[in-house]
Amino acid sequence: MNTCIFCEPPRDGLTLRNDLAYVLRDAFPVTPSHSLVIPYRHVPDYFSLTRDELLACDQLLRKTSEALRAADPAIAGFNIGVNVGSAAGQTVPHCHLHLIPRREGDVENPRGGIRHVIPGKGDY
C-alpha cells in the first residue's frame, strides 16, 4: 500500500499541471499562495529527477510565478527551495519544490534570503 501523500494528486486543489508534474498550494504555507511543484513519478529528491522532469518542473515554476503575480500585485519576489534529505529538513520522501511568494515588509530584513535556514548565516 502506497502511503506517499504526493503520489496520488488530489482531484481538487491542483493549480497547474503538465505531463510530468503538478502544482498544489502548500498545506502549511510560509506566506500566502506558497505552492509546491511536484513530479508525478515518485523520486526521493531533486537529484533523482530526469532532465525532462527538471524542465517540466521549471515550466510549472515559471507559469505559477506568473499566475501568482497576475493575481496578487503585492508579490515582489520569490524564494524557490528544495529540501534534500532529512538533514536539510525534508519530511516527505517525494521530491517537491517550494515556490514561496515574498512581499515587501513580510520580514523586517530579507537580506540573505534562504541563507536564514541556518540561524545567523543570513546576516553578512
Image: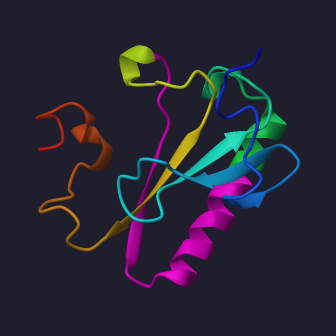
Please give the name of the residue rendered at 75% of the width and 19% of the height, measured from the top-left corner: 2
Please give the name of the residue rendered at 64% of the width and 23% of the height, measured from the top-left corner: 47
Q: Give the colour scheme shown.
A: rainbow
Of all residues, the one furthest to the right in this rendering is 19
Question: Is 8 a magenta residue?
Answer: no
Q: Percent position (x, y) of residue 71?
A: 54, 82
Up the image or down, 71 lies above or below 13; here it is below
* Left or right, residue 61 beside residue 39: left
Up the image or down, 105 lies above or below 112; here it is below
Please give the name of the residue rendered at 28% of the width and 50% of the height, measured from the top-left corner: 113
Q: Quadrant of residue 53?
A: top right
Question: Is 63 a magenta residue?
Answer: yes
Q: Percent position (x, y) of residue 79?
A: 41, 53
Q: Quadrant of residue 45?
A: top right
Q: Quadrant of residue 50?
A: top right
Part of the protein shown in magenta: 58-85
Q: Nearer the viewer, residue 20 or 27?
A: 27
Up the image or down, 99 lies above or below 81; here it is below
Q: Percent position (x, y) of residue 84?
A: 50, 23
